[in-house]
């Protein structure tokens, strides 16, 4: 899985490309756990993510908890399929989704 | 709330009564105005000068009053109460005029009393009665001073010329008349008043009773219509007719609605569940109980439980909320279309009829288990029977066998069997039986719902799954397995949307199997088959890990799970949401999970 990371000020933009599933979720998890203390906000750019499985949800949830004392995590570019999964599982109410 | 409704109902009934009486009263006013007009003409045409003098204006005044009462009635809003006093007052005055002009016509005073009685208003009746009595007392004085001389009450004397003259003063006449005529009349008048007060009171209570009666009947009818729409609205009517089986069913509610129901649903590609049930009790409580029993059975079947467990669980759930102490009898069967194997369970229900291909009819007798909803911890027993292609099963409720004819005789099971042996065409069994019952019970009102369901097993369903393809568990085989599924489903004609949902679900299941069957070690294999069968995308997964049914985990309450970090159940939760059907089986020491979605 290709994951682009871009830093602007204290905001880190992470753009994974491809499905976030059982196989690829650990890669995203590894990328997120590398985030340093100087990062105050994470933007997870989902525009190139066709779908997400429960493994992916778990990774996002972990990241959200990690950032709870900071400015948190925000999801952008969420497509309809992914949004449907987020809604179905109740994540929409917990996460900051653009 | 209830009391308020009653009051509103009564005042409404009183209102419509008042309006009707108003109409009669005003008609009397109109009639009297004609009479008074004639009287005026008569007075004018007679030669008695003093009568003309006084009474002409007097009668004319009354005529004007009567006509204005009619005019008022035509102009004011229907049902307004104040003109009533005017109408009755005017009629009272007319009575006074008539009895003054024509002596010995005291009886006219009864007219207003009779009219006012119909308003069923005690105070109104009483006040008009008092007013009438007062006018009655006044009458001799008015008539003596202004009316026709009534020689009965005058002192007469022949004068010097032999002419008879009246010697008494009008006051003397009046007093004489009052004592001699008015007082006895007042006694009669008082009696009439007492009678009319009695009529008012009984009329009022009759009115109240009638209103309450009408309201309770309306609320009962309303309740029954709610109950019957619950009952009817829930029953499926899209009867399946496939190459391998067909189902036909009917539920005819009795007059006061019981709680019969039937249901059927296909389970996976090769099984069909069907049932008939009878809820004790009537009306809305029975209908609601029926709705919850039906929903519970349905959802337990959907969750992949066997028939005995479905009833175990339904019984336990029904017991939790059954204050009304209702119960339901159920006969539930699941037919495997590929083998003809029927597994069934009977909770206190009538044994169904098995109609063999050769025409023999038998009763599927098994020792029934206890009814549902009344006893804790009952273990329902599953029975099995093999059906041959061409066999049919008729499920029914006792409304069929207990249908009565005009003399109260029951239709009986024997007669049902007799008719079944004469006609075994699955398309006409139910309509024919309905016709037979109608002829049998013609004219006799039926007190129980009547329900029948016919399951006809036409021929075995051949389901050809493609061969198992083996993929390594864990990450290694994941993508390969998914692309295998994708290409097989696209080949079978699935849309991109369906393929995507199947892929996502498959990904969840592979992750689940890798974790539970092989503890994420990559040395196990996962068998996969993907097919499109009867417009259903069907993907099966097989592993040889320890027995594990992922469907037995309860659906997660999203927020609670997220908070409690118990996110593990999410995978299966997503699969269930995306798929139309998910089933688990333990086959020859392997776990087989099948996911299905209509394409």
Image: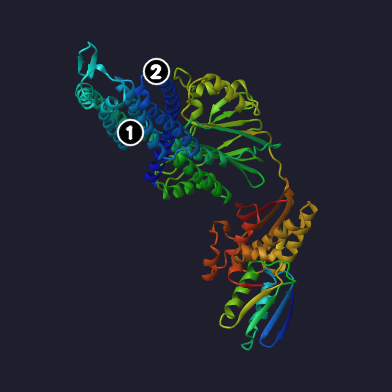
Looking at the picture, do discs 2 and 1 lie on one chain?
Answer: yes
Could you say which is closer to the camera, residue B78 or residue B556?
B78
User: Total of numbered circles in the picture?
Assistant: 2
Residue B217 percent location from the top left of the image: 43, 34
Q: CA separation, marks 2 and 1?
A: 51 Å
Q: Quadrant of residue B129?
A: top left
Q: Is residue B134 above or below residue B534?
A: above
Disc 2, SS: loop
Q: Is residue B305 visible?
A: no
- Callout 1: chain: B
The outermost residue toward the front is: B161
Circle 1 sits on which residue? Answer: B205
Q: Residue at x 61, y 20 (%)?
A: B422
Which label lies toward us, 2 or 1? 2
Pick the front one: B549 or A15:
A15
Tell me: residue B576, above or below residue B415: below
B131 sits left or right of A53 in the view: left
Q: Quadrant of residue B575?
A: bottom right
Among numbered discs 2 and 1, the one appearing first in the sequence: 2
Q: Say whether residue B224 is left or right of residue B361.
A: left
Q: Provide the residue designation for mark 2.
A: B46
Identify which residue, B57 or B391, lies in the foreground.
B57
Q: Position of residue A50 (x, y in %)?
A: 73, 67
Point out which mark residue B98 bears.
none
Residue B348 at what x, y percent from top left?
A: 45, 36
- The image position of residue A83, as x and y in percent, is 67, 65
């Amino acid at each position: 899985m290709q994951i682009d990371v871009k830093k602007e000020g204290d905001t880190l933009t992470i753009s994974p490309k491809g499905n976030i599933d059982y196989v690829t979720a650990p890669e995203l998890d590894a990328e997120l756990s590398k985030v340093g203390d100087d990062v105050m906000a994470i933007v997870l750019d989902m525009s190139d993510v066709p779908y997400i499985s429960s493994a992916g949800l778990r990774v996002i949830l972990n990241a959200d908890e990690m950032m709870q004392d900071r400015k948190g995590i925000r999801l952008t570019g969420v497509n309809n399929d992914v949004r449907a999964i987020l809604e179905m599982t109740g994540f929409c109410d917990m996460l900051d989704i653009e | 709330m209830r009391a308020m409704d009653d009051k509103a109902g009564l005042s409404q009934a009183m209102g419509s009564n008042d309006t009707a009486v108003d109409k009669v009263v005003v008609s009397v006013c109109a009639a009297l105005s004609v009479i008074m007009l004639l009287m005026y003409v008569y007075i004018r045409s007679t030669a008695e000068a003093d009568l003309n003098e006084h009474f002409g204006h007097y009668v004319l005044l009354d005529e004007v009053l009567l006509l204005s009462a009619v005019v008022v009635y035509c102009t004011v809003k229907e049902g307004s109460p104040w003109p009533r006093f005017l109408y009755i007052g005017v009629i009272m005055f007319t009575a006074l005029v008539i009895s003054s002009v024509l002596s010995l016509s005291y009886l006219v005073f009864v007219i207003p009393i009779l009219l006012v009685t119909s308003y069923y208003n005690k105070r109104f009746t009483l006040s008009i009665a008092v007013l009438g009595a007062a006018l009655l007392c006044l009458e001799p004085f008015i008539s003596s001073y202004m009316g026709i001389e009534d020689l009965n009450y005058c002192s007469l004397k022949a004068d010097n010329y032999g002419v008879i003259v009246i010697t008494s003063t009008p006051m003397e006449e009046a007093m004489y008349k009052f004592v001699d005529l008015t007082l006895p009349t007042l006694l009669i008048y008082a009696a009439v008043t007492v009678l009319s007060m009695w009529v008012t009171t009984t009329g009022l209570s009759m009115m109240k009773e009638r209103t309450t009666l009408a309201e309770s009947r309306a609320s009962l009818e309303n309740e029954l219509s709610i109950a019957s729409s619950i009952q009817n609205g829930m029953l499926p009517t899209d009867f399946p007719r496939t190459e391998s089986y067909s189902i036909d069913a009917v539920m005819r509610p009795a007059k006061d609605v019981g709680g019969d129901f039937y249901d059927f649903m296909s389970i996976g590609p090769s099984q069909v569940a069907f049932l008939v049930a009878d809820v004790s009790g009537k009306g809305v409580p029975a209908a609601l109980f029926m709705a919850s029993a039906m929903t519970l059975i349905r959802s337990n079947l959907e969750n992949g439980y066997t028939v005995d467990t479905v009833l175990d669980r339904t019984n336990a759930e029904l017991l939790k909320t059954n204050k009304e102490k209702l119960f339901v009898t159920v006969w539930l069967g699941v037919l495997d279309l590929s083998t003809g194997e029927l597994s069934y369970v009977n909770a206190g229900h009538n044994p169904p009829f098995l109609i063999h291909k050769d025409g023999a009819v038998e009763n599927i007798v098994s020792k029934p288990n206890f009814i549902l909803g009344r006893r804790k911890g009952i273990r329902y027993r599953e029975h099995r029977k093999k059906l041959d292609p061409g066999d049919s099963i008729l499920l029914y409720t006792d409304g069929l066998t207990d249908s009565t004819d005009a003399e109260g005789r029951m239709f009986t099971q024997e007669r049902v069997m007799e008719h079944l042996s004469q006609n075994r065409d699955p398309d006409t069994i139910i309509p024919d039986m309905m016709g037979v019952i109608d002829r049998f019970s013609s004219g006799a009102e039926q007190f129980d719902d009547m329900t029948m369901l016919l399951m006809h097993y036409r021929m075995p369903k051949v389901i050809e799954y493609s061969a198992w393809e083996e993929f390594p568990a864990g990450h290694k085989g994941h993508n390969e397995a998914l692309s295998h599924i994708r290409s097989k489903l696209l080949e079978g004609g699935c849309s991109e949307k369906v393929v995507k949902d199947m892929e996502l679900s498959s990904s969840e299941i592979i992750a689940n199997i890798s974790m539970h069957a092989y503890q994420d070690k990559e040395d196990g294999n996962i068998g996969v088959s993907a097919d499109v069968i009867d417009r259903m995308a069907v993907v099966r997964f097989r592993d040889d890990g320890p027995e594990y049914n992922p469907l037995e985990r309860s659906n997660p309450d999203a927020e609670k799970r997220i908070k409690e970090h118990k996110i593990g159940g999410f995978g299966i939760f997503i699969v269930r949401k995306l798929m139309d059907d998910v089933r688990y089986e333990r086959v020859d020491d392997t776990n087989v999970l099948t996911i299905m979605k209509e394409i």
